[in-house]
Image (cartoon, helix red, strand yellow):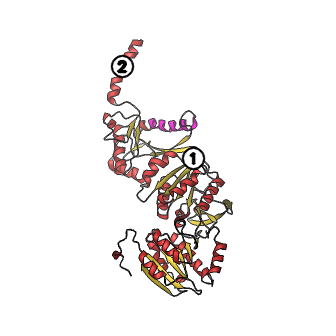
Amino acid sequence: MLNLSSHNRVWAWLCLLILFVTSSSFDVLIVFSNRTKAIMQNFITSTELFNKNSTEIFYCNDSYFDEEISNHPNLIAVFDITNNLNSQFEIAKVCEFNLLAHFLVSDSLPYQSKWTFLLSSSKEDLSKAIVSTLTYFNWIDGVAISDVERYASLCTMASGYSSNINLYSVGSNTVFHDLIGREIMKLGSSLFYLYLDKELSLELQKNLVSSKLIINGTGILLIEDGSYGSSTEGALAIVDKGKELTDSKENYLIDIISEMIDTLSNISSSYNIQKVLEERCINRHCVTEFSLINIQEAKRKIVGSIKNGKLSLNFPIIFPGSSTNIPISQKKVLFFSASNGSTDPGGNPVALVPINTRGIALAVKHMNTGTEILQNFQIKLSGFDCGVNIYNPDFCLSCFGKDINKLGLAHIGGLSSSMAMGDMITFKKLNRTTPLVSATNTEVSLGNSTKYPYYSRVNLNNYDLAAQIPLFLKTIGEGI
């Protein structure tokens, strides 16, 4: 093993080289970057791959390539994602053929007299597959979320398809419940498209489900790596043909590289290798078709195929909520919540105040059935029974905490000032910044925006009300 600390290079990275002699006159060089170190052990312990050939294992850095590779002039290099372009060029110069396991670096390698082929689909073909799927279901709007690495591709796809898709870019530091609460929920979308790596996709799916956004009438489409490990019932996924039942990128790499090595090890000349690769890899891409996956009972089921930008369904699809109806673009849904219960802590029933809270449901009904207010939206309301007149800190914390994901874009607080204050104190303890709206609280201190930045009232406070009463009485008196 080389001492990497002796090489003073900014781009210094650790990779694994696996050299083994095949039955032909060609050796195979598999190159890993530091970004996928986790799969090294998978390859080393993969008896299915290594028992077939005598294998040497080297740990190296970029400066080690030239010396070692020069002793193996007849090489086929199989690349994983590599960060250092200089390394890619140096390897490509001495290798007879270059096979890339990912398209993300395909535009960086020199083609010239070398034959470079990709073991995955192209960005263009994947974009066509996405558009084909969205067109098939007539999904012309929705929320599309990608990581930074894939964002440019997502923007290109969306801009050529529909201007009604809302785009978001996320990263490992993104707080998903804040993104959902502040941005996504206010859009009221019923369609979601996730173009993410496995970890980010799983975390976002969990938050979408817990926020009650993946329900009957909604649709969710996962793209490539974002589908790995998903158990979101009713989700759809677009994957390269051959990746249908794979649960991780690591296992897919092992499968595709093993299969390619088996194929090439039985070929005796570079001419025949070139011929096989050209026949198999259209426009240098060895994968040009896609499969449509449906998550049913936590299992990945192949329900369709996408070829030449055309989707063909072979089996029925189950959408979220066990629905067989294709989700359609509807009025955008705005989720609100309200303290509209009927009991105080201890289970004590309250008679008068619950009658007043019926106005909340009446207002929602009026806005959803009328056309003069919020024409393009529909309001959905979730209720909390965490106290009406009496604020009990422990009771409120427990009550709101068990259903915290039911909080909407804004919360209509309790009718008393003490309950409004209690709600805000509770939200802060639960790390929620949900705005609280009130139409009945008259406490003056609640108007302090520094102390209560998320409070908003639509009625007068005590001081303003007291100032208006004499003016009102005077006006009435003058009119008599």
Reading the image, the residue beneath label 2 is: 471
Magenta span of residues: 355-371
Please report the residue visible at 56 percent of the width from the left and 73 percent of the height from the top: 99
Q: Say which quadrant the N terminus sits in.
A: bottom left
- Viewer-closest of 197 and 117: 117
Q: In this view of the protein, which residue sits in the foreground, 292 or 382?
A: 292
Q: Viewer-proximal residue, 441 or 306? A: 306
In the rendering, which numbered label is found on residue 292? none
Q: Is residue 218 at all visible to an observer of this figure?
A: no
Q: How many numbered discs, if any?
A: 2
- Residue 55 image point, x, y percent: 50, 86
Q: Amino acid at mark 2?
A: Leu
Question: Is disc 2 surrounded by few (<14), some (14 to 19) or many (20+) residues within 10 Å?
Answer: few
Nearest to the observer: residue 15 or residue 108: 108
Q: Quadrant of residue 473?
A: top left
Residue 138 drawn at (x, y percent): 64, 51
Residue 405, percent from left and from top = 45, 52
Disc 2 to disc 1: CB gap under 8 Å: no
Residue 422 screen position, x and y as percent: 34, 44
Distance between the Cα atoms at labels 2 and 1? 50 Å
Q: Is residue 373 visible?
A: yes
Splitting the image into 4 quarters, where does residue 319 fall?
bottom right
The question of residue 147 being in magenta is answered with: no
Residue drawn 51% across the image and 88% down it = 54
As drawn, the label of residue 164 is: 1
In percent of the image, x 31 and y 41: which residue is there? 451
